[in-house]
Image: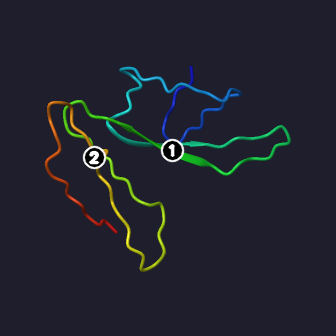
């Protein structure tokens, strides 16, 4: 059973791996980034592919922000918070948007 720790690669020969969650290995609520790099039988290494996984909080609402990965200078774009949620019967009633950098 592989153990996922930040910054420590898990190497397998199988194309599927389970991220085990338990009391000791609990991923905290929020966004977690995972990366995959593959190597072929000639030793060629791929560029990384990265995915975000959101662990939803069971008490507080969970914010999920979607935006384009890149835009051209001067191009307008949309921010989308529609996938944000709360545990029923709660509902989202306000969205606060902030430009950090």
Residue at left 16%, top 39%?
A: 91
With respect to residue 8, does 3 lie above or below? Answer: above
Residue at left 65%, top 32%?
A: 11
> In the displayed structure, does residue 18 sit left or right of residue 68?
right
Residue at left 56%, top 43%?
A: 35
Q: Which residue, given by chain and number where applicable, does mark 1 sit on? A: 51
Could you say which is closer to the camera, residue 82 or residue 86? 82
**What is the crowding at mark 1: few (fewer than 14 residues within 10 Å), some, or many (at least 20)?**
few
> Residue 65 appears at what percent x and percent y?
33, 52
Q: Residue lying farthest bottom?
A: 74
Q: Which residue, given by chain and number where applicable, does mark 2 sit on? A: 63
**What is the crowding at mark 2: few (fewer than 14 residues within 10 Å), some, or many (at least 20)?**
some
> In the displayed structure, does residue 25 sit left or right of residue 65?
right
Location of residue 31 (image quadrant): top left
> Residue 99 appears at what percent x and percent y?
29, 67
Could you say which is closer to the camera, residue 73 or residue 48? 73
Distance, label 1 to label 2, CA atoms, is 17 Å
Could you say which is closer to the camera, residue 83 or residue 55? 83
> Residue 43 appears at what percent x and percent y?
82, 43
Location of residue 39 (image quadrant): top right
Q: Secondary structure at mark 2?
A: loop
Q: Secondary structure at mark 1?
A: strand
């Amino acid at each position: 059973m592989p153990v996922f720790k930040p910054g420590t690669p898990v190497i397998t020969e199988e194309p599927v791996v389970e991220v085990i969650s338990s009391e000791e290995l609990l991923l905290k609520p929020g966004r977690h980034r995972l990366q995959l790099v593959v190597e072929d039988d000639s030793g060629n290494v791929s560029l990384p592919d990265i995915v975000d996984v959101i662990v939803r909080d069971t008490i507080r609402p969970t914010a999920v922000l979607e935006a384009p990965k890149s835009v051209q200078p001067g191009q307008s774009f949309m921010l989308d918070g529609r996938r944000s949620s709360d545990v029923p019967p709660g509902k989202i009633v306000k969205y606060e948007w902030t430009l950090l950098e």
